[in-house]
């Protein structure tokens, strides 16, 4: 949800809460909170006012109601005699009573000399709003004061009218007249119900009448005379204190003015404004705050606002309605929670869509993935055609220009190939695209499509400012389209291409060849596990005197049904499938075991495949084999080809050094076939250099080849390394090598590879 949507949602929520508050829906909550704030006050009455109550005790002792106004006259005289400051009658004297009683009360008012006040009432009549004043004879000696109190929307008496203008005179409210304070500007005066009514002195009317009151309770006080007896029904429901008498309510009004505590009501709008501000901040902030922290912040905001509302009431007599704000905070939190859930649901849907897209599309090229192609292959009909386009030499781009340029090349290739594919384009494996077409195609159509694909890739000569050169190898399959048959057939044909830039169409023999290799791999792994292979040993002879000085261990496999399987077949297969690691470990252990069993001092050489060298811990494998056979390290040579060294020269250096330090001999195999043979010869700790048999096969054919071979032998001599030649098949070859100073030779001229039993016999015959 964007910023403006969040703002709009929050404002609508606050508007709804405002409507609820305006309709009185939050009034009970506000009333309860306001009562709590009144209860937090420790205000005491000033002591300036005292109440003389017409209570149940007075009615019981006097014995009749209504009373004669003579009694009111007597009480007024008594109060003034006791030193009362002012006396206010919160009693209705608007109508005449007995002549004697009215006369007596009139005289008492005259004697009061203007220090007595009489109650006046504003009331609604059919003629409109009128003011009910005391009888005229009484007003000749006393001022009227307004005793009306106002009800709020909940029916509570919480304020009074400041006065009433009759047009001829302004009648002030009782609390204003009694306090002597100027009338507030507003006509409605709100009472502070935090003032404790229990601290206002209350005296029974009859006790004053019977002179049973301590004069100190009267002297200098303003006195309010009014009804507090239940049967007189002069009671009001007020905030905080519940039901109190009318005269006590007037006294609280007078104390409110006296102490400067006139309440100012701000209502809900400050809370509404603050909630709106928080809503706006939330719209900016949400990503930076978790829901737990947000909930805590909302609680702190509510508590803080309540504390602030209490503080401004205590310090400034300001009342805030906080219910709206208190409800707005959890409401905003729930809105945020809803927004969060909405975002999570949307993100989950987007993630699902993204996962679905990624499951069916390649992230680099944007083409269909292998899964996506297989899902949609049915769309090309019951028969179809697939062309696989594999980019070759792209590894060189990765090595020289980096993965980013290689990825950009793939993207450009996908863009260029898209127009070629009339149906589907997919990226199905590393550097390989598949183009799927509806229906089978004949050879001429296939050739045209392949030419188009080659032309599309041939246009890629520059990528991101870098010159690149890539070629393609293609394979095709056409015919029935069921499941992944077409793709499988095209991939089978592609495997037969290798890295050659050519085109191959699928035929059944390719599939049979792959199936043969698959079964052969399974059988080879089973043979390794079952110890079903065996070793043969080809003798190595010192050319100087013909002594047997060593042998090379070679692995052989007699398949149960295929018979003897050539190492030229099963060793490359093992390297491709990774089985070479287990095979090489078995050869090491078996060779060391056999070497330890022979009673001779010669050395046994064991080859380590480049794949085995890369993928296994050669040092650990050699150490373990020596320990299992209890074979001294100086009776073992490890032959490592130059190809194994070039993958990671620093790692190769550490391995060669570690083997040499353990006493194991290390030979550089197939010397002369790699471009950096001389560097390996001079920088790594090899004991022997095994010259590749291709040099021996050309011996005597040309002077240049002979000179090169002789130079290699002389180089080994200068480097103080033994030279070993393999593939020696004639006496002439052996004689020439001996003449040039070659140290050791092996080949059919000396012996073919022998079984362990035959080699042991060869040892005895050589001795």
Image: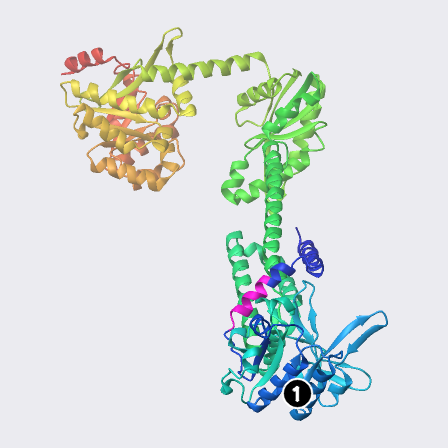
Q: Is residue 667 above or below residue 128?
A: above
| Residue 245 picture location, percent across and down | 61, 71
Whether the magenta-drawn stretch holds residue 125 is answered as no
Q: Is residue 78 above or below residue 267?
A: below
* Mark 1, other Cα within 10 Å: few <14 / some 14–19 / many ≥20: many
Any part of residue 551 in sight: no
Any part of residue 86 in sight: yes
Residue 13 figure quarter: bottom right
Q: Main secondary structure of the magenta part?
A: helix
Q: Across the whole image, how many numbered discs are drawn on residues?
A: 1
| Residue 681 picture location, percent across and down | 31, 38
Image point 78% across, 78% down: which residue? Answer: 131
Image point 39% across, 22% down: which residue? Answer: 574
Residue 284 figure quarter: bottom right
The residue labelled by disc 1 is 116
Q: Quadrant of the C terminus?
A: top left
């Amino acid at each position: 949800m964007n910023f403006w949507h969040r703002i709009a949602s929050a404002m609508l929520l606050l508007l709804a809460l405002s409507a609820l508050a305006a309709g009185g829906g939050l009034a009970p909550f506000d009333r309860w909170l306001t009562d709590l704030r009144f209860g937090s006050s420790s205000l005491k009455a000033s002591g300036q006012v005292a109440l003389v109550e017409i209570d149940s005790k007075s009615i019981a002792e006097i014995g009749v109601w209504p009373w004669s106004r003579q009694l009111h006259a007597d009480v007024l005289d008594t109060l003034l005699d006791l030193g009362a400051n002012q006396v206010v009658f919160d009693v209705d004297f608007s109508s005449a009573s007995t002549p004697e009683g009215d006369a007596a009360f009139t005289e008492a008012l005259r004697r009061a000399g203007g220090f007595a006040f009489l109650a006046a009432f504003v009331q609604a009549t059919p003629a409109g709003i009128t003011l009910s004043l005391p009888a005229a004879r009484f007003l000749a000696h006393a001022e009227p004061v307004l005793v009306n109190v106002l009800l709020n929307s909940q029916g509570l008496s919480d304020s009074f009218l400041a006065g009433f203008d009759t047009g001829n005179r302004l009648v002030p409210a009782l609390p204003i007249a009694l306090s002597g304070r100027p009338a507030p500007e507003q006509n409605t005066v709100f009472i502070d119900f935090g003032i404790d009514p229990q601290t206002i002195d209350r005296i029974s009317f009859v006790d004053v009448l019977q002179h049973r009151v301590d004069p100190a309770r009267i002297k200098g006080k303003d006195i309010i005379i009014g009804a507090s007896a239940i049967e007189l029904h002069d009671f009001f429901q007020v905030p905080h204190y519940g039901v109190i008498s009318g005269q006590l309510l007037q006294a609280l009004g007078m104390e409110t003015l006296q102490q400067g505590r006139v309440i100012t009501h701000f209502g809900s709008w400050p809370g509404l404004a603050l909630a709106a501000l928080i809503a706006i901040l939330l719209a900016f902030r949400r990503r930076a705050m978790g829901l737990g922290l947000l909930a805590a912040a909302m609680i702190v905001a509510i508590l803080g606002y309540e504390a602030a509302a209490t503080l401004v009431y205590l310090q400034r007599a300001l009342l805030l309605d906080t219910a709206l704000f208190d409800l707005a905070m959890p409401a905003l939190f729930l809105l945020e929670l809803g927004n969060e859930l909405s975002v999570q649901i949307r993100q989950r849907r987007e993630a699902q869509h993204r996962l679905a897209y990624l499951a069916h599309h390649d992230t680099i090229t944007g083409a269909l993935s292998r899964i996506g192609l297989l899902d949609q292959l049915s769309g090309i009909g019951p028969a179809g055609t697939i062309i696989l386009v594999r980019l070759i030499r792209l590894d060189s781009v990765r090595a020289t220009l980096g993965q980013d340029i290689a990825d950009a090349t793939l993207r450009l290739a996908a863009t260029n190939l898209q127009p070629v594919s009339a149906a589907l384009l997919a990226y199905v494996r590393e550097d390989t695209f598949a183009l799927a077409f509806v229906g089978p195609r004949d050879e001429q159509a296939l050739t045209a499509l392949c030419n188009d694909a080659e032309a599309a890739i041939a246009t890629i000569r520059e990528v991101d400012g870098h010159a690149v050169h890539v070629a393609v190898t293609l394979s095709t399959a056409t015919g029935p389209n069921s499941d992944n048959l077409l793709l499988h057939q095209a991939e089978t044909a592609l495997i037969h291409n290798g890295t050659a830039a050519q085109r191959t169409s699928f035929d059944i023999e390719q599939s049979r060849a792959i199936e043969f290799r698959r079964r052969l791999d399974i059988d080879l792994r089973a043979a390794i596990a079952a110890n079903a292979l065996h070793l043969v040993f080809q003798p190595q002879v010192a050319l100087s005197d013909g002594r047997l000085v060593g042998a090379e261990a070679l692995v052989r496999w007699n398949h149960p049904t295929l018979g003897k399987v050539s190492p030229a077949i099963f060793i490359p297969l093992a390297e491709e499938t990774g089985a070479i690691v287990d095979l090489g470990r078995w050869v090491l252990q078996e060779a060391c075991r056999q070497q330890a069993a022979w009673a001779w001092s010669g050395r046994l050489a064991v080859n380590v495949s480049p794949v085995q060298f890369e993928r296994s811990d050669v040092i650990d494998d050699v150490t373990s084999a020596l320990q299992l056979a209890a074979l001294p390290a100086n009776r073992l040579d490890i032959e490592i080809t130059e190809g194994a060294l070039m993958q990671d020269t620093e790692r190769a250096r550490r391995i060669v050094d570690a083997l040499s330090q353990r006493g194991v001999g290390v030979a550089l195999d197939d010397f002369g076939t790699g471009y950096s043979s001389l560097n390996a010869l001079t920088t790594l700790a090899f004991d022997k250099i095994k010259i590749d048999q291709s040099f021996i096969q050309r011996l005597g054919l040309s002077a240049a080849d002979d000179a090169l071979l002789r130079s290699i032998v002389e180089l080994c001599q200068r480097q103080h390394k033994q030279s070993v030649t393999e593939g020696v098949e004639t006496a002439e070859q052996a004689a020439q090598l001996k003449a040039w100073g070659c140290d050791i030779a092996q080949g059919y001229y000396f012996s073919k590879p022998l079984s362990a039993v035959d080699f042991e016999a060869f040892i005895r015959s050589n001795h």
